[in-house]
Amino acid sequence: MRKLRVSFDAGAIPPQPTGVGRYAFSIANALSGRDDIELSILCRNGDYSRWKDAVPVSSVRRMFPDSRPGRVVVEQLLLGKKLGKMGVNLHHGPHYTMPARAAVPVVVTIHDLTFIENPQWHEPFKVPFFRMAIKKAVSAASAIICVSERTAVSLNTHFTPQCPVVVAHHGIDGTLFNDIEPSVGYDDLVLDSFGISRPYIVFLGTLEPRKSVPMLIEAFNILAREDSELRLVIAGRQGWAMSSVMDALDSSVDPSRIHMLGYVPDEKLPSLLRQAAVCAYPALEEGFGLPALEAMACGTALVTTPNVPAIELAPEVPWIVDSRDDASVGEGERLAAAVRNALSDSEQRTGKIKKGLVSAQEWTWEQSASKHVSAYRMALGLAGERTQ
């Protein structure tokens, strides 16, 4: 049996990966562990060592300049021809984009349609580029991968894809994200390193408009008046339009009880989740919402919104923020009410946490990789077959 040879565009993954970056690393690892895939990682010149260490069984090739403009030029104008000389069967663009012309079939991952539906949530200079990229994928890709049913529905609402569309949910690395400390006292050491004391609410994610961090701080202000010990932990790198977050911090009840950690590496995230009283993830819209699934896997009570597709996998687990259009109740008050319920209803809390732990075990990066391979085979006209 000959392996399916796939090139994987890792040129757009930032030094501190979140969201799409964590997806790219995780799915590349899962694909590399399969006996039917031979993966070639195409990275930036200065990113070779990172990918070689992260995905050791794959071939890693320096393909792109380190600068964003240079990378885009190489991907759009040069990569397509180079693929024909690399001996790959197929190319995967995991972040919306694909070469303008490619010598092999191309599969593209579409994470969400917010560049089309809610462009105000993105940096203005990115919107026209990614709108164009999505339109290109819809018309020219050989298969499209969507990370949730919601994204697939949105894609088909706005476009008529000329290729198969496969839903491949994100997964969990169960060896990292689970409810068991690696050793006695490990989590306490992590909390101590950040100066965090319990009880606390935790948020994970890039600080950008659609994550609703100012609303979370408003909700915390309400809860902080009721509980003088409660704290808020915000773990994530700064995105764009940070002024609203800073204004919310300046007007908070007690800024000393809000811990802004910045970017936190993956190995410390499970400790923050395991020891949290609640994980609050009030995103306005997500393609998937990986922190919600990671919270379930770590046995953390989860409060989120109906706009986070990760809850498709376990709809009975989270407390959902009431989204009714009631002008007499503010958004912060509705979020505070959901968090309050998660903190106070011990019987319901226990049941939801148990269901979350069971559900999270079903969703792995290996099962996601299987869906990716199905998309690859559809792109090659080999659905249901093995390469010979």
Image: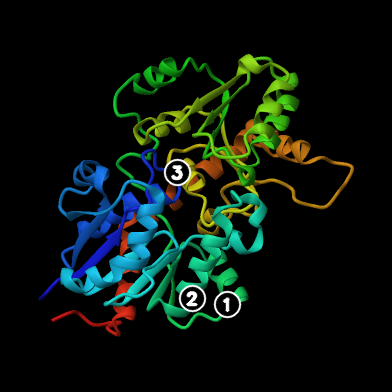
Question: In the image, what residue type sits under mark 3?
Answer: Glu
Disc 1 from disc 2: Cα separation: 7 Å
Figure check: 202 above or below 121:
above
Figure check: 344 above or below 307:
above
Q: Position of residue 113 (x, y in %)?
A: 57, 63
Which of marks 2 and 3 precedes in the sequence? Answer: 2
Which one is in front in this view, the residue at disc 3 or the one at disc 2? Answer: 2
Q: Position of residue 234 (x, y in %)?
A: 55, 30
Question: In the image, what residue type sits under mark 2?
Answer: Val
The numbered dot on residue 294 is 3
Residue at x 31%, y 75% (from the top left corner): 102
Which one is in front in this view, the residue at disc 1 or the one at disc 3? Answer: 1
The residue indicated by pointer 2 is 138
The residue indicated by pointer 1 is 159
Residue at x 36%, y 39% (from the top left corner): 15
Q: Position of residue 41 (x, y in %)?
A: 24, 56
| Helix, strand or loop status at disc 2 | helix
- Left or right placement of residue 274 versus residue 347 in this view: left
Quarter of the picture holding the N terminus: bottom left
